[in-house]
Amino acid sequence: GMSLPAFASSDAGAEALYDIPKFGNVSLLHFTDCHAQLLPIHFREPSVNIGLGDARGRAPHLVGEHLLKAFGVKPGTAEAHAFTYLDFEAAARTYGKVGGFAHLSTLVKRMKASRPGALLLDGGDTWQGSATALWTNAQDMVDACKLLGVDVMTAHWEFTYGEKRVQEIIEKDLKGHIDFVAQNVRTTDFEDPVFPSHVIKQINGVPVAIIGQAFPYTPIANPRYMVANWSFGIRDEDLQKVVDEVRGKGAQVVVVLSHNGMDVDIKMASRVSGVDAIMGGHTHDGVPQPVMVRNAKGTTLVSNAGSNGKFLGVLDFDVKNGKVADFRYRLLPVFSNLLPADKAMQAYIDKVRSPFKARLEETLAITEGLLYRRGNFNGTFDQLILDAMMEVKGAEIGFSPGFRWGTSILGGQAITREHVMDQTAITYPYTTLTDMSGEMIKTVLEDVCDNLFNPDPYYQQGGDMVRVGGLEYTCDPMADMGKRIVDMRLNGKPIDAKKTYKVAGWAPVAEGAKGEPIWEVVETWLKANKTVSPRKANLPRLVGMDGNPGMA
Amino acid sequence: ASAQAFDRAAFQAKGIADTLKALGAADATESKDVTIVSPDIAENGAVVPVGIRSGVAKTQMMALLIDKNPNALAAAYDLLEGAAPEVNMRVKMGQSSDVVAVVKADGKFYMARKEIKVTLGGCGG
Amino acid sequence: MADPMKIRASAKDGVVDVRVLMAHEMETGQRKDASGNVVPAWFISDVTASLNGKEVLKAHWGPAISKNPYLQFKINGGKAGDKVTVSWVDNKGDKRTDETTVS
Ligand SMILES: [Mn+2]
Ligand SMILES: [Mn+2]
């Protein structure tokens, strides 16, 4: 832990946080789910991240004080701010912004200097999440990753630029620089592999295999038509074959660079043997220390490295006599006040932003309250989107997807166009207004709720619950599918299964959907309001969750 | 071994129990030697890859049933001499459902069951 | 006449892996057209596969098999150079036979 006075003197603070002793002879650096955030940002970690069954009280389902206690993080420190939502606004003002590729780059260089031969792994969700990534068709992030020195990557939201664009980037930009690996993507005809499953690299004379695991449910969570000729899935039996293959080729360290989400990774680690580490992403969990999972032939460590450029995972292996003897892991928060901007990266970021700068920085409104997204059920920024969408579209109920990306804004700050795009920059931003029966509304809520709370992680997709505006409901996460959502009400009156309601939504996954982009709808509303009063997030009444360490 | 002519009436049966009866497999026993290989969540309900594997000696027939489809029987396979007890196919599923694999080996019936989820999609981290 | 099947057959350790893609609508008989009339069921009902002329697998299908059906199976005791033949017939009596050599 580090006290505030130490933090205030930036050199001492940086030393305390970042001078971590080198260990062993094979090091891997890992960032994931940066969601195209090139600049430092604020990002509030969740106060609700419920785990059920085996996952109850186990990382990543620990929030706030529960997390601090489990990992021995001292309250009131910079690390406590990085890993939890506690006292968020005040701490954010004290410790400043996090992430930013120029600052991350400085940290990567520092780690590479103390750990010769270290590889930099990118877990995916890198090319999507900002205005500039969308407006440059991912090019700004592709070039930033090359400059950052990424060695190996896998993917999820990358696929929402479409099959052709992904292939084009691999051919034109990544070739010879970054290995794009994914063992679990096949053609839909004969199930041929689309990408190399793995790459074997020599680190200080040790052969190290990095196997890629792309997000298994991409064609479900995102529009299937964008990857019409590709099929995904967890395919853990195929993963076992790849592990056996690379061990056969002499790999002494086997690491899966995964975008499964942490609960799926933990289950996968119990079913596949011969993997030293699964370095994971997708669920955006900033977990200070890995979870150790036993399987048929040994133990696999499972880590997850947060999101939005906030963290760099550092995994050091001591490899002796052809196998891993010991390891050390640190998840380092990237405090932009403690890490000077790397000059070359800053120059690149300035250049790539310059054509868009005025458009990005235009103030649309001022927010009086904290705006954030992350949490199982709702966030204040999602509430703002719901309020805007329902008012502009004339709907009585609003649905907004449970994305886990999207930066936070402190009370009193300007909401710029860039901030709005941080919450909405996707390639299928259409807003819709639909007449939905009460029965259909329940079906939708039950379907998404099962993706979050199914007791078997392989049946989960790893997003959060759809954000709901207007409608009040009660949620019983431990009930069976179809029975979790009860007592739905609109303006105090029970929802009638047969009656139809006007429901506004955005980000439809069906092909052919049309509608004004969500950022235009939000912008219209912000410009009309000018000042945004604090939003009260509409949350369901929860049943049976008292005392769950995944709740604040 | 040559197969008997297949009675297509089984394709008209509804639900698992009646279809098993129509296949003459009403007394099928659950067996760990029968496995269903499929995704837990279907990417596309119109194209769900499902495989059946049998570890039971003398497997002669394998069939796939989908509980919630209008008619449960999707496919039946007669394995003649030389065929390995392993087939993969792609099927349509209108909604989340249990699927059942039925295996006939040396005149006896065995089965396995698995849930495949068909979801509306959307959202994600 | 229906489009040809795509067949891949490869041998490894005495086992032939056969993958077949057929071109067929596989109409369920449940769907209604734009004017509300039920589109009649139209699907491949039977598939036969042979190795060097000897039948090894018979498939009986209903309309729940996906459009442009895929079938994968394995044959013990085959080798490179063997002939794999696949035939199908649909419920309207249309049929198709294609052949490939095991690689
Ligand atoms: Mn992500
Ligand atoms: Mn993701």
Image (spheres, coloured by chain):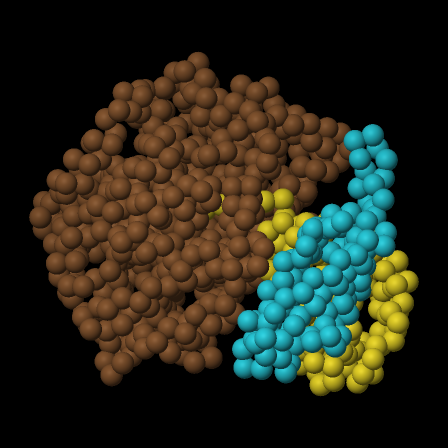
Q: In front here: C12 or A382?
A: C12
Q: Against B7, is A312 above or below?
A: above
| Left or right: B102 in relation to A175 | right
Residue C55 pos. (x, y %): 76, 75
Can residue A92 be seen here?
no
Drawing shade for chain B: yellow
Residue A392 pos. (x, y %): 53, 19
At 42% from the left and 76% from the top, the residue drawn is A244
Can residue A430 be seen here?
yes
At 29% from the left and 37% from the top, the residue drawn is A140
Q: Against A282, is A26 above or below?
A: below
| Left or right: B114 in relation to A538 | right
Q: In front here: C91 or A397?
A: C91
Residue A368 sits in quarter: top left
Q: Tell how many labels.
A: 0
Instruction: Give the position of the N terminus of chain B as an image quadrant.
Output: bottom right
Residue A535 pos. (x, y %): 45, 28
| Left or right: A544 in relation to A526 | right
Residue A391 pos. (x, y %): 54, 20
At 53% from the left and 34% from the top, the residue drawn is A507
At 71% from the left and 34% from the top, the residue drawn is A438
Drawing shade for chain C: cyan
Drawing shade for chain A: brown
Q: Against C69, is A503 above or below?
A: above
Q: In front here: A30 or B39?
A: B39
